[in-house]
Image (cartoon, rainbow, N blue to C red):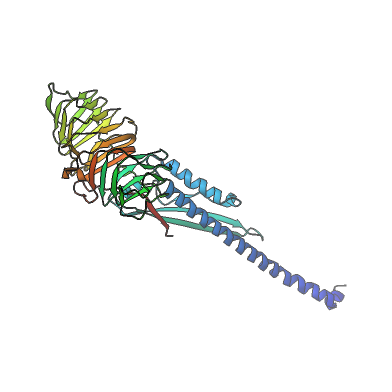
């Protein structure tokens, strides 16, 4: 029977067909596996790109590493829908946030966020696997220099410019991280000149008013949020309490003051002043003067200088708190009020990421006022102010930038 089978033409064709079919099937399966793996690879790459961009876009002050990772993971999984069961968890080249504080300061012009993952496609034939690993690298670059920055992500009028105001920002911008339709709000007869306005949301009261002069063609709306310039700065450790001398006129030495009201005509010697509670409230016709000082408003301490008082403050030019005049931690939500009378000036950073900052300049004739940087949860400006961008030395080498630019550079 076997002899007849081998001699049979139909038998020969059957054997030949069987022999030929197996590699053909294997070839077809290989093409299918290759195509499927390639498609999955493209989806993997796209998912990693979106995850890295989401991290770069979504970062704002106070976010934890876990929150940043979750942003990336959520976007990755959403984009890997349908094949995520075979994908590895997203990995990062560095711990997050990837030194975003360096980008916020003057120490770096750009940083990189790298995401990595892989997927194993199980082949059709046998146990053959198709492992694929991919990564994405997103570059973040600084935006233009800013003089005023409101950090709140949602507040209406997060930067408010009202009244008989004359605000001149020389070569720098006003920035707002709010996504509100009135993120930057100008009203009344306020005059404003600046390089530009950068907001996550929209602006109000700018339009074609002759009182508004911008170097850019129009406000830059719908931008990425700006980095907190002092996100990496920590206040000094402190213990003990110092006394405040009696009398209206007094000179204070650097140190820690607990639940004290500092009032009268006060001169601060150079150094760090830590207020544990209490307040700076000068009283009628009082004054506060200090060169090379940083005031830390800890444990709900308050700072309020009113219209008939004089404030003249400049920051240290070197050391860990160079360029910082007033530092209020995010946990302190008390409003900072700087509303000095004629002859007042404040330079350096006034920093209150968790609070409202009310600033009435009245200092356009003072050259020392030119290097002020206002950073608050929300900011209101009134009076006359003349701020410039080019004052690196006076700010201790620190800088502040509006928005951020991103690109995939893998």
In this view, 370 is above or below 360: below
If the image is split into quadrants, where does the C terminus sit?
bottom left
**Which residue is at a point 84% across and 75% down the rendered structure image?**
10
- In the rendered image, residue 205, in percent from the top left (x then y), is placed at 37, 44
In this view, 322 is above or below 241: below
Q: Is residue 381 left or right of residue 223?
A: left
| Quadrant in the picture for residue 360 | top left
- In the rendered image, residue 62, in percent from the top left (x then y), is placed at 38, 39
- In the rendered image, residue 68, in percent from the top left (x then y), is placed at 44, 44
| Quadrant in the picture for residue 17 | bottom right
**Which residue is at a point 16% across and 39% down the rendered structure image?**
292
**Among all residues in the image, which is located at the extreme top?**
246
- In the rendered image, residue 270, in percent from the top left (x then y), is placed at 14, 36
For this rendering, which residue is in front, 10 or 359?
359
Q: Is residue 228 left or right of residue 291?
A: right
Residue 240 seen anywhere in this rendered image of the structure: no
Q: Is residue 344 left or right of residue 163?
A: left
If the image is split into quadrants, where does the N terminus sit?
bottom right
For this rendering, which residue is in front, 322 or 392?
392
**Which residue is at a point 19% across and 40% down the rendered structure image?**
363
For this rendering, which residue is in front, 18 or 303?
303
For this rendering, which residue is in front, 135 or 194?
194
Number of marks drawn: 0
Residue 209 seen anywhere in this rendered image of the structure: yes
């Amino acid at each position: 029977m076997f002899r007849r089978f081998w001699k049979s033409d139909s038998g020969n064709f059957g054997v030949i067909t069987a022999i030929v079919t197996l590699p053909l099937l294997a070839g077809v399966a290989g093409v299918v596996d290759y195509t499927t793996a390639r498609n999955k690879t493209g989806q993997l790459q796209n998912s990693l790109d979106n995850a890295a961009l989401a991290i770069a876009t979504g970062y704002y002050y106070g976010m934890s590493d876990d929150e940043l990772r979750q942003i990336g993971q959520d976007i990755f999984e959403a984009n890997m829908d349908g094949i995520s069961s075979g994908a590895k968890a997203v990995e990062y080249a560095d711990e997050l946030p990837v030194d975003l504080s360096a980008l916020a300061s003057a120490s770096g012009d750009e940083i990189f966020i790298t995401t990595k993952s892989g997927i194993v496609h199980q082949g059709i034939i046998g146990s053959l696997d198709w492992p694929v690993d991919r990564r994405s690298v997103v570059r973040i670059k600084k935006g233009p220099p800013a003089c005023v920055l409101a950090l709140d992500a949602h507040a209406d009028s997060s930067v408010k410019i009202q009244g008989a105001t004359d605000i001149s920002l020389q070569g720098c911008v006003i920035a707002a991280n709010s996504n509100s339709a009135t993120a930057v709000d100008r009203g009344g007869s306020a005059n404003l000149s600046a390089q530009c306005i950068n907001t996550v949301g929209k602006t109000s009261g700018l339009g074609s008013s002759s009182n508004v002069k911008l170097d850019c063609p129009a406000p830059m709306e719908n931008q990425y949020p700006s980095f907190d310039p002092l996100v990496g700065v920590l206040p000094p450790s402190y213990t003990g309490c110092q006394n405040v001398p009696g009398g209206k006129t007094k000179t204070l030495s650097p140190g820690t003051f607990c639940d004290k009201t500092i009032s009268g005509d006060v001169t601060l010697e150079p150094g760090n002043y830590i207020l544990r509670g209490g307040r700076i409230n000068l009283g009628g016709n009082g004054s506060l003067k200090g060169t090379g000082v940083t005031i830390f408003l800890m444990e709900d301490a308050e700072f309020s200088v009113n219209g008939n008082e004089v404030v003249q403050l400049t920051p240290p030019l070197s050391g860990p708190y160079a360029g910082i005049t007033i530092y209020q931690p995010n946990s302190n939500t008390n409003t900072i009020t700087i509303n000095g009378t004629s002859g007042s000036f404040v330079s350096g950073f006034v920093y209150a990421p968790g609070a409202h900052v009310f600033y009435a300049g009245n200092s356009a004739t003072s050259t020392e006022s030119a290097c002020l940087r206002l950073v608050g949860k929300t900011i209101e400006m009134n009076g006359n102010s003349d701020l410039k961008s080019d004052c690196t030395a006076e700010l201790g080498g620190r800088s502040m930038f509006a928005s951020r630019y991103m690109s995939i550079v893998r």
